[in-house]
Image (cartoon, rainbow, N blue to C red):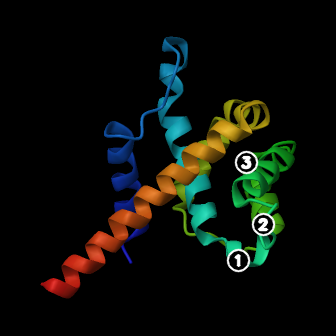
């Protein structure tokens, strides 16, 4: 497993590559906050055992994830949102550098408002990033086994 700091660096590189954020010019100063928020949600998404949660064919993991994000966004701060999301998805903890959550806490007004108003967008972006991080990790494991 790659370290959290290296993974965060890789995630930032993915934002510069194919995983673009469709930001209005007025939202450009918030880019790092949005990237950190999507990374945090991607790490949550990766940690969930979706086989236990989305068991029926009518309940999709995307819908569950979006609903949990929206429900948690009513909390008073980002740390409490994180606790609520983890609790609702059956997680004890997640592997995110604490500085990421600390940074999100500093911009909590933007984070909470964005999650409350656009949970589907941020859930989809997080799932995209999670998929990219999984592929990158699989590629790195394959290179280690070959080398």
- Asked if labels 3 and 2 touch by Cβ distance under 8 angstroms, the answer is no
The quadrant holding residue 118 is top right
Q: What residue appears at the point 61 percent right and 53 percent down from the top-left corner?
A: 41
Nearer to us: label 1 or label 2: 2
Residue holding disc 2? 57
What is the CA distance from the residue labelled 1 to the residue labelled 2? 11 Å
- Asked if labels 2 and 1 touch by Cβ distance under 8 angstroms, the answer is no
**Of callouts 1 and 3, which one flags the residue occurring earlier in the amino acid sequence?**
1
What is the CA distance from the residue labelled 2 to the residue labelled 3? 32 Å
Of all residues shown, which one is farthest toward the top? 26
Vertical position of residue 114 compared to residue 86: above or below: above
Vertical position of residue 73 compared to residue 132: above or below: above
Residue holding disc 3? 78
Residue holding disc 1? 51
Vertical position of residue 127 compared to residue 73: above or below: below
Q: Nearer the viewer, residue 61 or 95?
A: 61
Q: What residue appears at the point 70 percent right and 40 percent down from the top-left corner?
A: 120
Residue 13, horizontal then vertical, whole percent: 32, 46
Dot 2 crowding, Cα within 10 Å, few <14, some 14–19, many 20+ = few
Residue 80, horizontal then vertical, whole percent: 80, 54
Nearer to us: label 1 or label 3: 1
In what element is the residue under mark 1? helix
Vertical position of residue 105 compared to residue 26: above or below: below
């Amino acid at each position: 497993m790659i370290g959290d700091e290296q993974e965060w660096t890789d995630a930032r590189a993915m934002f510069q590559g194919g995983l673009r954020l469709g930001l209005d010019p007025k939202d450009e100063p918030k880019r790092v906050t949005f990237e950190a928020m999507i990374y945090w949600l991607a790490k949550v998404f990766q940690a969930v055992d979706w086989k236990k949660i989305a068991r029926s064919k009518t309940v999709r993991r995307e819908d569950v994830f979006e609903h949990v994000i929206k429900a948690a966004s009513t909390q008073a701060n980002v740390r409490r949102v994180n606790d609520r999301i983890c609790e609702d998805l059956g997680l004890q903890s997640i592997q995110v550098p604490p500085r990421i959550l600390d940074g999100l806490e500093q911009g909590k007004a933007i984070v909470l408002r964005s999650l409350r108003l656009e949970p589907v967008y941020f859930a989809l972006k997080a799932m995209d990033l999670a998929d990219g991080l999984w592929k990158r990790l699989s590629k790195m494991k394959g290179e280690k086994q070959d080398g």
